[in-house]
Image (cartoon, grey):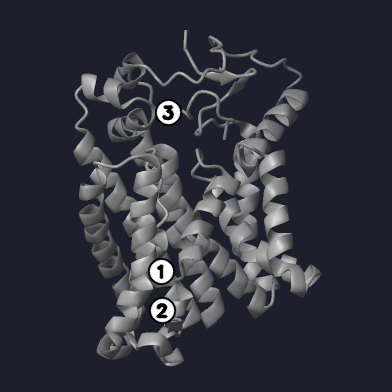
Amino acid sequence: MRISLRERGTSVSPFATSPLRTAMMGVLALAAVVLPFVLSSFVTFQLSMALIYAIAALSIVLLTGMNGQIALGHGAFFGLGAYTTAILVQNHGWHFLLTMPVGALLCFVLGVLIGIPALRLRGAYLAVLTLSVAFLFPLVIKRFNDFTGGSSGMTISQDLLDAPEWSGLSRDRFHYFLALLVLMVLLVLTRNLLRGRTGRAIVGIRDNEIAAITVGIHLPTVKTITFGISAAFAGVAGCLYTVTIAFVSSDAFPVQMSINFLIGAVVGGLYNIYGSIIGGLVLEFLPQYSQSLSPSLTAFVYGAALIVILLVMPGGAAALIGKALDGVGRLVSGRRPGSGESTVAVPVSSEPISSESIRSGDDDPVAPAGSSPP
């Protein structure tokens, strides 16, 4: 008999699958491939930006949602990746594809360096530390204006960012498919990471640090490496940002950007890696939609829309979609909730996960008790 956590009869595993979900993913994948060929260049550019923001939101999901470390400084890692690509491409003639591993490595190292002293901090104190990094980044960029262009920024020559001839694609379409490919690769890597022993350690630390220590998990190592991987993801997103925008400046990476990444992760679903895709779409299109409704009340409309989204979908959009698909699947198959599998219902509780759960060999890490299912 398989034991699974449930909330009100719904599985909370972020990797739950069903034929209906598989079919939906296939349709979405087909749409993602076809859309650039039927939409205008500007809309394709917007979708590229949404995919880039989705990668940034994924970095928050991994660090905050899965490991429990509250981070408000990922805009700095995003900016470091962006400037790495800009400097290497414009000043040193690198191909932009080769700059992404460099940007990821630099951000990983910086993330580890920040993660080590952050081990002594938790909750709001950790958030303040990472927020300070976001505050300092634009100031550092302005300080080294010989390399970064300071407040004036850097413009990258368009011919250095053209699509390769072998692709047969326009620049906008190539950038879109590049961002889509990178996002899919990172989603697969994150999914595989979380399904293994390391993933159980990451999630176990989030739910109960004492239980994690009891079963032999080395907290400093796991938390620091998770911080570094998350920073590397944000750095890759920054590299793609430069490739797509072809311009970087210190003003492009304000503190608000870090907060926006957290908003995207929460709206999409903080405990679901696929929710980051929805979060990226929200970050790109909701502000523009708000401005189109009322240019003078853009911030108000944007904030009100976020409040409504969070009230309607407290577990994130991915949780609501998952519940809807489960309901449709039961209607189509004609089965009642819970039929077809042997499970033990666990009531919603605020108690953390136990050491036995961390030690178990279950491949699927779960959302914390009391949270909405992804």
Gap between marks 1 and 3, in whole Å?
30 Å
Q: Earlier in the sequence, mark 1 or mark 3?
A: 1
Q: Is residue 38 visible?
A: yes
Residue at the disc numbered 3: 364
- At horizontal 22% and vertical 19% (from top left) the residue drawn is 214
Q: Is residue 64 left or right of residue 119?
A: right
Question: Residue 359's image quarter?
Answer: top left
User: Disc 1 on helix, strand or loop?
Assistant: helix
Residue at the disc numbered 1: 238
Q: Are marks 1 and 3 in contact (CB under 8 Å)?
A: no
Q: Is residue 246 left or right of residue 322?
A: left
The three-letter amino acid code for the residue at tag 3 is Asp
> Of discs 1 and 2, which sits in the foreground?
2
Answer few, some or many: residues within 10 Å of disc 1's Cα (few below 14, many 20 plus, some between 14 and 19). Answer: many
- At horizontal 23% and vertical 34% (from top left) the residue drawn is 219
**In this view, 141 is above or below 159:** above
Which quadrant is the C terminus positioned in?
Answer: top right
Question: Residue 37's image quarter?
Answer: bottom right
Q: Is residue 132 left or right of residue 256?
A: left
Q: Residue 144: give x, y in percent of width and height.
A: 27, 84
Could you say which is closer to the camera, residue 136 or residue 216?
A: 136
Q: Residue 284: give x, y in percent of width and height.
A: 61, 65
- At horizontal 50% and vertical 33% (from top left) the residue drawn is 15
Q: Is residue 155 visible?
A: no
User: Disc 2 on helix, strand or loop?
Assistant: helix
The three-letter amino acid code for the residue at tag 2 is Ser
Q: Residue 321: give x, y in percent of width and height.
A: 67, 39
- At horizontal 25% and vertical 88% (from top left) the residue drawn is 92
User: Disc 3 on helix, strand or loop?
Assistant: loop
Residue at the disc numbered 2: 250
Mark seen at residue 170:
none
